[in-house]
Image (tube, helix red, strand yellow):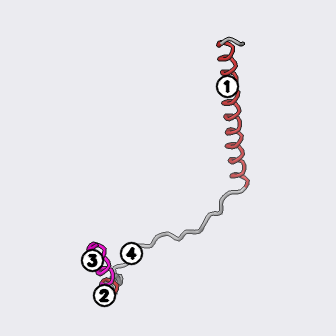
Amino acid sequence: MTSISEQLSDALGIMIMGMGLVFTFLSILIIGIGIVAKLFPAPVADIPAPQAPSNTALDTSLDPKLVAAITSAIHQYRAK
């Protein structure tokens, strides 16, 4: 039977090896993603500049039937 110090030494070695492998894999993954991002850049969409709002009044009136339907639904929901 092996001593506890040998077992702890083996466990420490396995832990360091595992953490090293994970660190290496993640480093390679980050470098690979960076290379792919430089080789294939994302397309840039042409977004028009926002225009200043005009002084004309916007048509923000709601349909009275829609308002009545929503109000009725709210009252029915709260009645339950």
What's the amino acid at mark 2? Answer: Pro
Which SS class for mark 1?
Answer: helix
* Cα–Cα gap, marks 1 and 4: 62 Å
Kindly indicate the quadrant of the structure image that contains residue 28: top right
For mark 3, give the secondary structure: helix
- Rendered image: mark on residue 56: none
Instruction: Please say if the residues under marks 4 and 3 sit with CB atoms less than 8 Å apart.
Output: no
Upstream in sequence: badge 4 or badge 3: 4
Residue nearer the viewer, 40 or 69: 69
Disc 1 versus disc 2: distance between alpha carbons? 71 Å
Residue annotated with mark 3: 75
Looking at the rendered image, the disc whose residue lies closer to the viewer, 3 or 2, is 3
- Residue pointed to by mark 4: 53
Observer-nearest of 43 and 3: 3
Residue under label 1, please give it. 16
Where is residue 19? Give x, y as percent.
Answer: 66, 30
Using the image, determine if residue 77 lies above or below residue 69.
Answer: above
Measured in 3D between alpha carbons, the distance from the residue under mark 4 to the one under mark 3, in whole angstroms, is 37 Å
Instruction: From the image, state whether disc 4 or disc 2 is nearer to you.
Output: 2
* Number of the front mark, 1 or 3: 3
Instruction: Assess whether residue 77 is covered by the magenta stretch.
Output: yes
Disc 2 target residue:
64
Amino acid bearing label 1 = Ile
Q: Earlier in the sequence, mark 4 or mark 2?
A: 4
* First of labels 1, 2 by sequence position: 1
